[in-house]
Amino acid sequence: MKLFFTLLISTLFINAKCDLNALKLLSSYSKISKCENNRIYLTNGKSFLYDDGKKKSFKQLLNSPDIEDMFKFKYPHHQVSGMPLNDDPGRIRFEPLFKELYGHSASEVKRNLVRIPWFGGDILVTRANGVARALSAVRAELNALPAKYKKYLHPIGGTFKWRYIAGTNRLSVHSFGAAIDINVKYSAYWRWSKGGYRYRNQIPYEIVRIFERHGFIWGGKWYHYDTMHFEYRPEILK
């Protein structure tokens, strides 16, 4: 019966010029009410075009995506030691949708920020879309790991900060209080790479798996790697 219901919903979505990725969005965020006639509708009545039908370069995917483009690259559910050229699952973000989900300005986002315990002290994250609840569950599982893993978790690089991604005019997910950078000391970032591009990582996969179980994707699974970075993107993991 459950399989039949899933197939029925999937068929309705496809017939309405939407696809299974649109269904993943609907099941991930309560503020998204439906996908119909190639548009994503929010509970406040606003809507966005889902698929503009345009073929885009990698640069265009980053700077002028539609919602469907966010699923361009498939997130790997296994340990990686680097990704193919420009394969950055989850790094493409349709910013107007994120603003509707979390807030259009720093002041709007701040209204939903809450403090939760982390290693070494409390941190500020959004309660919108269940992010604070999910990160609290992450902390509980991380706390059960052997002591040798704790050094990767504090001091943290940061959580909420309304800012643009370095070298771009795109807002970071940190702007929405839905991301955390763990200890910078043990992290690697593609822009820091010297002497040519080479994938680097020190973050144990035991830590990564816990974040992923609770809806957080890892920047270490991007070609443009950022191994300290985790952001709440449950739709990408489904």
Image (cartoon, rainbow, N blue to C red):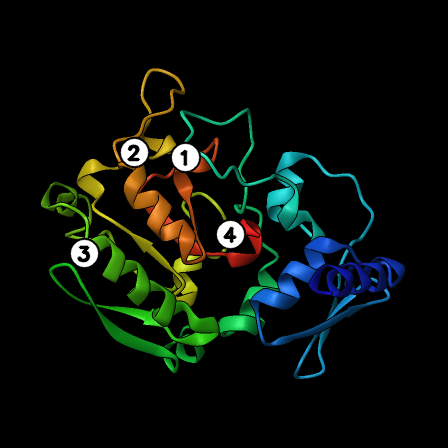
Name of the residue lying farthest toward the front: 1
Considering only order in the chain, which callout, 3 or 4, is on the residue closer to the N terminus?
Answer: 3
Considering only order in the chain, which callout, 2 or 3, is on the residue closer to the N terminus?
Answer: 3
* Three-letter code, disc 2: Ala
Mark 3 vs mark 2: in front: 3
As drawn, is 143 to the left or to the right of 112? left
Asked if residue 44 is positioned above or below residue 77 in the image, the reply reads below
Position of the N terminus, as image quadrant, is bottom right
Gap between marks 4 and 1 measured at Cα: 19 Å
Numbered tag placed on residue 188 in the rendering: 2
Gap between marks 3 and 2 measured at Cα: 23 Å
Which picture quadrant has residue 54? Answer: top right
Gap between marks 3 and 1 measured at Cα: 25 Å
Find disc 3 in the rendering and name its residue: 143
Find disc 1 in the rendering and name its residue: 225
Considering only order in the chain, which callout, 4 or 2, is on the residue closer to the N terminus?
Answer: 4
Asked if residue 25 is positioned above or below residue 70 in the image, the reply reads below
Q: Position of residue 159 (x, y in %)?
A: 30, 60
Considering only order in the chain, which callout, 1 or 4, is on the residue closer to the N terminus?
Answer: 4
Gap between marks 2 and 4 measured at Cα: 22 Å
* Three-letter code, disc 4: Asn
